[in-house]
Amino acid sequence: MASVAGDDIDILAKARRTLGDDYTPSDDEEYMSEQQLEYFRSLLVEWKKSILSAAEGTLQSLQDGPIREPDLNDRASSETDWGIELRTRDRQRKLISKIDAALRRIDRGEYGYCEVTGDPIGIKRLIARPIATMTVEAQEAHERREKISRDD
């Protein structure tokens, strides 16, 4: 079974392939131009469709019937696999809400800018993680604060 992060990367890569190779945002253009915003909007919509499609397959498998493995070890293994699958789908459900939030930021004209500093997040970061809400520096500072508060 593939890792959860690997699944997310695969689904995002599939969404990129769906868009085609016609256009990729670059640093040479005006930051968050109409063309860039449309690219990210399309990417986010395709990513969401891919996640929903994968979730539909899981739901269909669950509705097909309970696990009826005669061997206890096989049944335990199947139940573990289902548990992992359900946790993956729950994680992706949360990802969909982040995708929806990113689409709302595009509509409001806030997409691509750090929610902490207001600085541009950067095209390369957004291509790698289209739902990013902070610059790398702000994200690192946030994670350091989080770690310190957990250690207390």
Image (tube, rainbow, N blue to C red):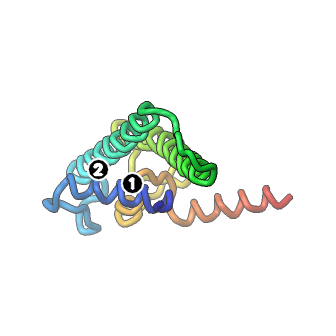
Which residue is drawn at the image coordinates 28% and 52% (left, top)?
A: 15
Residue 58: percent from the left, percent from the top? 42, 40
Amino acid under label 1?
Pro
Front one among 38 and 97: 97
Residue 37: percent from the left, percent from the top? 28, 48
Which residue is drawn at the image coordinates 26% and 57% (left, top)?
A: 16
Examine the rendering and report whether any part of residue 32 can be seen: yes
Which residue is drawn at the image coordinates 44% and 41% (left, top)?
A: 96
Which residue occupies the extreme left position in the image? 22
Residue 87 position (above or below residue 6)? above
Query: Mark 2: which secondary structure?
Result: helix
Q: How far apart, in angstroms, are the residues tagged by discs 1 and 2?
A: 8 Å
Instruction: Look at mark 2 in the image and give the residue it sits on.
Output: 43
Instruction: Look at mark 1 in the image and give the residue it sits on.
Output: 130
Q: State which quarter of the image contains the C terminus.
A: bottom right
Q: Quadrant of residue 13?
A: bottom left
Examine the rendering and report whether any part of residue 104 can be seen: no
Q: Are circles 1 and 2 on residues that touch, CB within 8 Å?
A: yes
Q: Quadrant of residue 60?
A: top left
Residue 55 position (above or below residue 137)? above
Residue 70: percent from the left, percent from the top? 56, 45
Front one among 126 and 66: 66
Which residue is drawn at the image coordinates 51% and 48% (left, top)?
A: 85
Residue 67: percent from the left, percent from the top? 52, 40
Residue 129 position (above or below residue 70)? below
Front one among 133 and 85: 85
Characterize the local packing of mark 1: few (<14), some (14-19) or many (20 or more) Cα atoms within 10 angstroms.
Answer: many
